[in-house]
C-alpha cells in the first residue's frame, strides 16, 4: 500500500488553505460621494477659478511695482535682491543685504512711498 510521506500532508494543508484564501474576490470599493453641483459647467468653473486671496489686487501690484522701481533707482539698493510683496498696503520686504545701512535704506525708501501703510521687514544682513 502506498502511503503519503508525513511531510506531504504538513505542506499540502497550508498550501491548500492559502489557495482557498486567495481565491476569494476582494470586496468592491465603496463609491465616493461627489459634492452636489448644479451642472457640469459650474463644476468646471468652481474647480479652476482662483480664490480671491490668491489674486493680488491692482493696488497691491501698483505698490509692489512702485517699491521695486524705487529700489532700482537707488544706487545703494539696485544691485541687491530684495523681494517685495504688498497686501492691502502692507509691504513685506525679504532677502539679504551686505550692510545694515542697506537694510535701513530699503525700509526707509519703501515707507516713504505712496500706498505703503506698514512695512514687515524680513531683510537680513549677510554675516
Image (tube, rainbow, N blue to C red):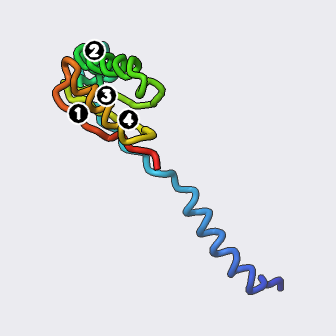
Earlier-in-chain disc, 4 versus 3: 3
Q: Is residue 90 above or below residue 42?
A: below
**Nearer to me, 5 or 40:** 40
Residue 9, located in which quarter of the rendered image?
Answer: bottom right
Gap between marks 4 and 3 measured at Cα: 18 Å
Q: In the rendered structure, find residue 102 and report the number of the disc placed on it.
A: 4
User: In the image, 75: left or right of 6?
Assistant: left
Dot 4 lies on which element? helix
Name the residue rendered at 28%, 38% in the picture.
121
Visible residue check, residue 36 = no
Q: Nearer the viewer, mark 4 or mark 2?
A: 4
Residue 82, located in which quarter of the rendered image?
Answer: top left
Dot 1 lies on which element? strand
Visible residue check, residue 100 = yes
Residue tagged 1: 119
Dot 3 lies on which element? strand
Quick one: label 4, few (<14), some, or many (20+) residues within 10 Å? some
Residue tagged 2: 62
Q: How many marks?
A: 4
Amino acid at each position: 500500500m502506498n502511503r503519503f510521506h508525513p511531510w506531504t500532508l504538513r505542506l499540502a494543508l497550508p498550501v491548500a488553505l492559502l489557495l482557498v484564501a486567495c481565491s476569494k474576490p476582494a470586496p468592491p470599493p465603496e463609491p465616493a460621494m461627489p459634492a452636489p453641483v448644479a451642472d457640469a459647467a459650474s463644476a468646471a468653473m468652481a474647480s479652476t477659478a482662483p480664490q480671491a486671496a490668491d489674486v493680488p489686487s491692482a493696488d497691491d501690484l501698483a505698490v509692489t511695482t512702485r517699491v521695486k522701481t524705487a529700489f532700482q533707482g537707488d544706487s545703494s539698493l539696485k544691485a541687491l535682491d530684495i523681494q517685495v510683496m504688498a497686501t492691502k498696503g502692507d509691504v513685506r520686504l525679504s532677502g539679504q543685504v551686505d550692510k545694515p545701512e542697506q537694510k535701513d535704506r530699503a525700509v526707509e525708501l519703501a515707507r516713504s512711498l505712496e500706498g505703503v501703510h506698514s512695512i514687515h521687514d524680513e531683510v537680513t544682513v549677510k554675516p
